[in-house]
Image (cartoon, helix red, strand yellow):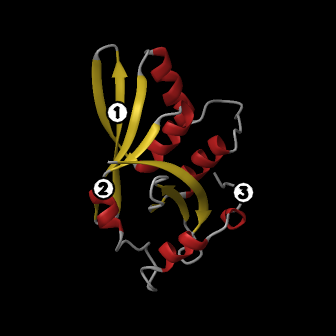
Amino acid sequence: MLKMEIKGLLMDPVSNMPVVVLRDAANGVFLPIWVGIFEANAIALQMEKITTPRPMTHDLLRNLLSELETKVERIVINDLRDNTFFARIHLLRGDTRWNVDSRPSDAIALALRVDAEIFVEEDVLEKSKSLRPEGDDGDPDRLKKWLEEVSPEDLGKYPM
C-alpha cells in the first residue's frame, strides 16, 4: 500500500472530465482518477478552503463522525474493476474499527475535510496503467506523459 497526496484537480483535455491526480511522494507515481463534476466541486471547495453557508454532504459526514466521536483513520483506494475505482474509509471509535465502501471521490473529499491520509493498493496502480477515460481513443500513455511534464501553473487553480 502506498501513501498518496493530492497533486491537483484538473480537467482532462481529451475527455473534458475532472481528474483528481494522486501522487506517491516517495517515487513520483501518479494515479489519475476521473470523477464527476459534483464530486470535483466538493473536492475543490475543500482544497480552496471555501466555507459554504450550510454544510455540504461531505461536511455533514465530517460533522456526524465528530459528534459520534469517530475518527477517519485513512482512506484506501483498494480496487479497480471495469474502469471503476473502489475505496474504503477506515474508521475508529474507541476500540472498534470499521471500514466502509465508498467511491474514491467521496472518500477523498472526506479525507480532505478530516485531514486523513490517502492510500492506494499497489495492484490498483498496476491495473491503472492501461486505464483510459471514456471517449479517449488516443495514446494510453498520453495522460501519464502529460502528468510527468506538467508544471504547477498548468494544473489550474487547484495545485497542491
Residue 29 coordinates in the image, percent (x, y): 44, 62
Question: In the image, is 56 to the left or to the right of 24?
Answer: right
Question: In the image, is 101 to the left or to the right of 8?
Answer: left
Q: Residues within 10 Å of mark 2 (few under 14, many from 20)?
A: some
Disc 2 and disc 3 in contact, CB within 8 angstroms: no
Q: CA distance from mark 1 to mark 2?
A: 18 Å
Q: CA distance from mark 1 to mark 3?
A: 30 Å
Circle number at residue 109: none
Question: In the image, is 50 to the left or to the right of 13?
Answer: right
Q: Residues within 10 Å of mark 1 (few under 14, many from 20)?
A: some
Which amino acid type is marked by label 2? Answer: Glu
First-in-chain label (1 vs 3): 1
Is label 2 or label 3 in front? 2
Q: Which residue is mark 3?
A: 157
Residue 143 coordinates in the image, percent (x, y): 50, 74
Which amino acid type is marked by label 1? Answer: His
Q: Is residue 40 above or below residue 70?
A: below
First-in-chain label (1 vs 2): 1
Circle number at residue 90: 1
Q: Which residue is mark 2?
A: 122
Q: Is residue 109 above or below residue 121?
A: above
Residue 99 coordinates in the image, percent (x, y): 30, 33
Q: Which type of secondary structure does the marked residue at label 3 adopt?
A: loop
User: In the image as oriented, which residue stretches furthest toward the bottom?
Assistant: 138
Q: Which type of secondary structure does the marked residue at label 2 adopt?
A: helix
Residue in view at x 60 percent, y 56 percent: 8
